[in-house]
Amino acid sequence: MADDEQLSHLIGMLYEAVMAPECWPDALEYCSNYVGANGGHLLVIDKSSGRIQKEFYGGRYIESQDFTDWANGYLLEDPRMTSGMMTNIGVHEWRFCHTFLDEGFVARNPLYQEFLIPIGVRFTMGGLVDESNDSKIMLGFFRTQEQSPFGIQEQTAAKRLSPHLQRAFRLHSHTQHLQAKAELGAQAIEAIAWPLLIVDGDAHIQHLNARAEQLLTAHFGGLSCRFGHLSCFEPSAADELAALVRQATKHPAIGGGMCLHALPGARILVAPLPAASQWIKDWQRPLALVLIAENSEMLSGSKPFDLDFGDWPSMDMAKCDPVAGFAKTYQLTGRETEVLQGLTDGLSPKQIAERDDVSRNTVRTQLTSLMQKTDCHSQKDLVRLFFSFR
């Protein structure tokens, strides 16, 4: 049976997949190796309709299209699903196909003979990873006809793995739900006509809408953005804004406002976000909402405040280059911007160096500067910040 070190590495891969769903195939391939299988197929099935809501697959020999063909054409008539193998199965219970479907049945069954065996699936070990009122999560591991059936050793490994997979997938589902809510929130922020930003307690910008990006890029209204830090050009105004942000991100959190003298009649309103509630945990990072609006219109609910940018060219923010916008906000150099572009395109530092015909040390130096300017600690954090910025 696989040792504890292998299981620990596998658990790490599962939680990596929680935050990056594209890693699920690799995680499932490692799960397959852990239990001595060639591949694995994870299914989230709607209990009322029997249809697949979500699926992931990983491993050797079997192509993703084969799983798609099985789900589209054979799921409801697969004897492994309709026999006693996977019916009335308990959570974290694992069963073998050869216990319920003998050699004689397999030799006569069209699904085995015409589809499963030709694609490399003869022996299956299936388990129920989790179940709710609406859905159930099932996982099948596979071996070929040339291999031996699954046994007690593989079943024991699957039982060790199953609780970790259950927790990881529950967290995955919760994370997906939160991400969907966050995307709706980002869309709502973008739809607001006033310049609006979300900042942390040090006034580092975490998110901003197109109107705020216009304002900062134009260096208009007395506001400044250096290395992703929101401030004001005038020292006393900078101190006042910094104090408002600190006040909105401490405990207890308090909102406030100040006049923006460079835009007559305009005010900066700073309000705490829910993270700064009385229930805040030590590990959470309080955030504040910064809104730039004309006070009288804000209070009366009249039409949105329309900033006058004078002769500054109008921008179609829907067509704005997100890399350029990010580079302006964090004041990146041309070379740093090219490195950022490479990372967001999925290139490694080595590939960026080859693309630009420069040394890897040069790319590393530019990457180090990128990290410092964006307050990131890894390439993954930098890419994640970029896509949240968009």
Image (spheres, grey):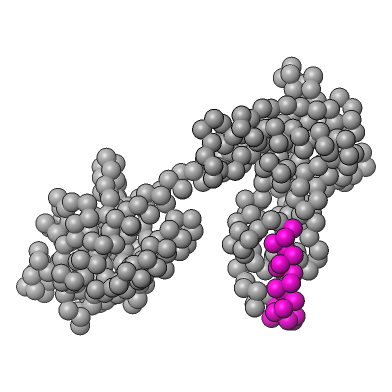
Q: Position of residue 14 (x, y in %)?
A: 40, 61
Q: Position of residue 91 (x, y in %)?
A: 22, 51
Q: Quadrant of residue 82?
A: bottom left
**Residue found 83% across the figure and 38% down from its top:** 238
Q: Quadrant of residue 38?
A: bottom left
Q: Is residue 211 left or right of residue 60?
A: right
Q: Main secondary structure of the magenta part?
A: helix
Q: Nearer the viewer, residue 73 or 191?
A: 191
Q: Is residue 18 left or right of residue 340?
A: left
Question: Compared with residue 60, is residue 324 higher up or lower down, i.e. above or below?
Answer: above
**Bounds of the magenta segment:** 353-373
Check the picture and name the quadrant holding the N terminus: bottom left
Question: Compared with residue 40, is residue 352 higher up or lower down, i.e. above or below?
Answer: below
Question: Compared with residue 24, is residue 249 higher up or lower down, i.e. above or below?
Answer: above
Work out whether residue 62 can be spotted: no
- Count of numbered tags: 0
Q: Is residue 292 rendered magenta in the image?
A: no
Q: Is residue 64 left or right of residue 207?
A: left
**Residue found 22% across the figure and 59% down from its top:** 127
Work out whether residue 277 can be spotted: yes
Q: Position of residue 374 (x, y in %)?
A: 71, 56
Q: Position of residue 384 (x, y in %)?
A: 60, 56
Question: Compared with residue 201, is residue 169 higher up or lower down, i.e. above or below?
Answer: below
Give the farthest residue toward the right.
311
Q: Quadrant of residue 246?
A: top right
Q: Nearer the viewer, residue 47 or 19?
A: 19
Q: Nearer the viewer, residue 51 or 143?
A: 143
